[in-house]
Amino acid sequence: MVDSYLVRSLKRIHDQAAETLEVKEHTSSESIAEQFNQILEDFQEEYPDNERLNQIGAVEGTTASMRRMHTVEAANEDLRKIKLQTEQIADLFDLDVTDFEQVDEVTELRPVIIQQNTDITQETEVSQSLEYTQIIDQVDNAMLDDEEAENLKKLINEFQNEIEDTNTDESRLRDLVGRAKQYGAGIGTQVGAKLTMAGLQAGYDLIP
């Protein structure tokens, strides 16, 4: 049985690549590539005798710039490769790819039940905390000015605090998701999608 941490990490990277591909604005692939390369290394260390797994290679990642349009397509190609290779890894270990989050043509999220064997509340809380940290890391790598980046990170922290509050206000969560989606450089759509998924996992349907 594949370690649940590896499954969750693989799913997260797959979904992030899929969501980013739906964004119409130029988006760099370096951050996602770095995360993919790390989980690929983790899998290969865990299963060193799996020849097909060892044939899967790392992805370098590309910084996209509208002034160099070829970098935009190169970044998209990286994302397509990451998405494909996460699916290949899933196939190698008989993980159901249909359980990975599905994103439709207008980038709205369709919630999918993820079957995971986890009974440890503490482990879940740590995983959720890491997810918020990863979202903030994604903001740091986005093409935003310093003030916009700080404001968006503050919004993410407000969302986390609200969802972890004993008296969570669902309408405020919706407002924070809506405000996050207004940010440009492609990052607003990505952060909004991530926060929506965090809400779904916590039992709040934030899909408009």
Image (cartoon, rainbow, N blue to C red):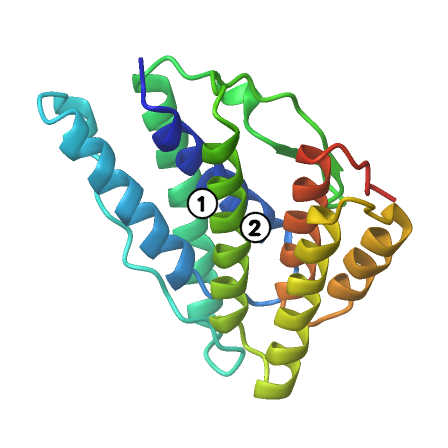
Q: Is residue 72 left or right of residue 104?
A: left
Dot label at residue 80:
1
Identify the amino acid type marked 1.
Answer: Arg
- Helix, strand or loop at mark 1: helix
Quadrant in the picture for residue 93 = top left
Which quadrant would the N terminus be assigned to in this image? top left
x, y percent for residue 53 = 20, 27
- Helix, strand or loop at mark 2: helix
Q: Name the residue at 32% across, 19% down.
A: 2
First reached walking from the N terminus: tag 1 or tag 2: 2
44 vs 133: above or below: above
Question: Residue furthest toward the front?
Answer: 166
x, y percent for residue 136 = 53, 64
Between the residue at mark 1 and the residue at mark 2, the CA separation in whole angstroms equals 7 Å
Q: Is residue 122 left or right of residue 148?
A: left
Which residue, given by chain and number where applicable, does mark 2 sit on?
21
Question: Closer to the camera, 37 or 151?
Answer: 151
77 vs 6: above or below: below
Task: Give the mark count.
Answer: 2
Quadrant in the picture for residue 197 = top right
Q: Name the residue at 48% across, 56% down.
A: 134
Q: Is residue 55 visible?
A: no
Identify the amino acid type marked 2.
Answer: Leu
Q: Are marks 1 and 2 in contact (CB under 8 Å)?
A: yes
48 vs 69: above or below: above
Q: Is residue 182 left or right of residue 24?
A: right
x, y percent for residue 39 = 30, 41
87 vs 68: above or below: above
Q: Name the residue at 86% across, 49% down.
A: 169
